[in-house]
Image (cartoon, rainbow, N blue to C red):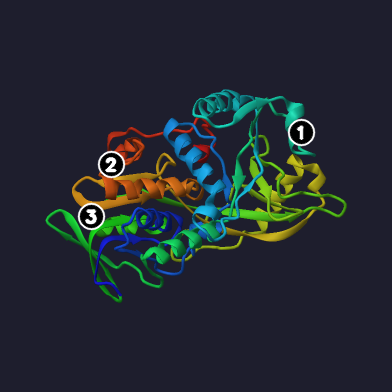
Amino acid sequence: MRRSAEVVIIGGGIQGASTAYHLARRGLTDVVLLEKDTLASGCSGRTGGVIRQHYSTPLVVEIARQARDFFATFDREVGGHSGFIRNGLVLMVGEKDREALLANVALGAGCGVPTRLVEEKEARDLVPGLNTEGGAAFAYEENAGYGDGYGSTVAFAQRARDLGVSVMQGTPATRLLIDGGRVAGVVTPQGTIAGGAVVNAAGPWADRVARMAGVDLPLKLELIEEGVVKAPPGETYPVDTPSVYDFINGLSYRPEGDGQVMAEGNSYYKGPLDADGYPTQPSDAYIEDVAHRLARSMPRLASGTVRGGWAGLLEGTPDYHPVMGAVPGVEGFLLCCGFSGHGFKEAPVTGRLIAEIILDGRPSLDITPLSIDRFRTGALLRSRYKDDPIMA
């Protein structure tokens, strides 16, 4: 293993892999990517995978817009298989969320996102069988899509490796070396790697890594469960059917292969959560609940067959927005974590921004609103959807 590197990245999920790729793409290959288990073995391999640009803050909209465009050319530019399918996104809200939807659509359109309000009939035409009862406002984001978190992570890491980055799986970071107020290296069971910069992209483990540098990173783990339902005999559900965010019935869903739907609603898991041990399969109660919600939203799937699903962790920050950039008082220590369920869709750009800080001294987008300092000053970011802060 390397005993030194210009940059050590902790975390082999999509954020760490994207950062490694963008550094290598710019010519910096003296980089070590550390993963405690295997690539995408955490959140990145268990994402719902929806790629949207519907957000409440201009910065996040711009990150998502650029990331969506990256996904559209991912397989050609990076290689591998991102699984990107452009299918569009229909949003349906009740009266209490009407103003939030209208404001977010206006914000997105002003940032160049092809999004617009649609009438109830057009929403039903876009998603055949959609039950629009109770809907007060509808929107359509025409170039939204979905993709494969595992495939995208592995593709980023493989391309970085091809360019000269060292990717070390099964290699946890056990301690950070701090010398005179700056990070000096990372200790692993295989030895110490001296480093000029360390990127904390450790996902659900990011608060533990931060504590190694004496930094308090406020993260709360939540379980995200996904259920897969196969359309009943005689019903079709093509892979390019638009994804749906149904605020009336409290769920979102998208195609999962031809003839199947992946649905996500509220999790009712109440047990303790630990990043080193958590349920990876949805509970029977959750599957039953999400199937009922899906039947209300899409009645033609009511007699569909449940085909299982998966579960993963969300590392939420107090405002459900990521933490990015340098850490005051610990020179050379960078954060790229706390994505609160949005990391997959934003990773092509957030990894690039961290690479730009390292290579250029500043990112091409002003990410000051995402700094760790906001938790100290109270300058938190908020979703316009007050009852659904993860919609950010």
Q: Which residue is mark 2?
A: 362
Residue 303 appears left or right of 256: right
SS at mark 2?
loop
Q: Quadrant of residue 57?
A: top left
Which residue is drawn at the image coordinates 60% and 62% (left, top)?
A: 281
> Which tag, 3 or 1, sits closer to the chain's start?
1
Q: Taking 166 as reference, is 239 above or below it? A: above
SS at mark 3?
loop
Q: Taking 297 as reference, is 182 above or below it? A: below
Tell which of 24 and 170 is nearer to you: 24
Q: Taking 339 as reference, is 56 above or below it? A: above
Q: Examine the rendering and report whether any part of residue 269 can be seen.
A: no
* Cα–Cα span, label 1 and label 2: 45 Å
Look at label 2 and name its amino acid. Answer: Arg
Tell which of 368 and 21 is nearer to you: 21
> Which tag, 2 or 3, sits closer to the chain's start?
3
Q: Which residue is mark 3?
A: 214
* Cα–Cα span, label 2 and label 3: 24 Å
SS at mark 1?
helix
x%, y% of residue 113? 55, 32
- Label 3: how many Cα within 10 Å (few below 14, some 14–19, many 20+): few
* Cα–Cα span, label 3 and label 1: 53 Å
- Label 1: how many Cα within 10 Å (few below 14, some 14–19, many 20+): some
x%, y% of residue 289? 69, 50
> Which tag, 1 or 2, sits closer to the chain's start?
1
Q: Quadrant of residue 171?
A: bottom left
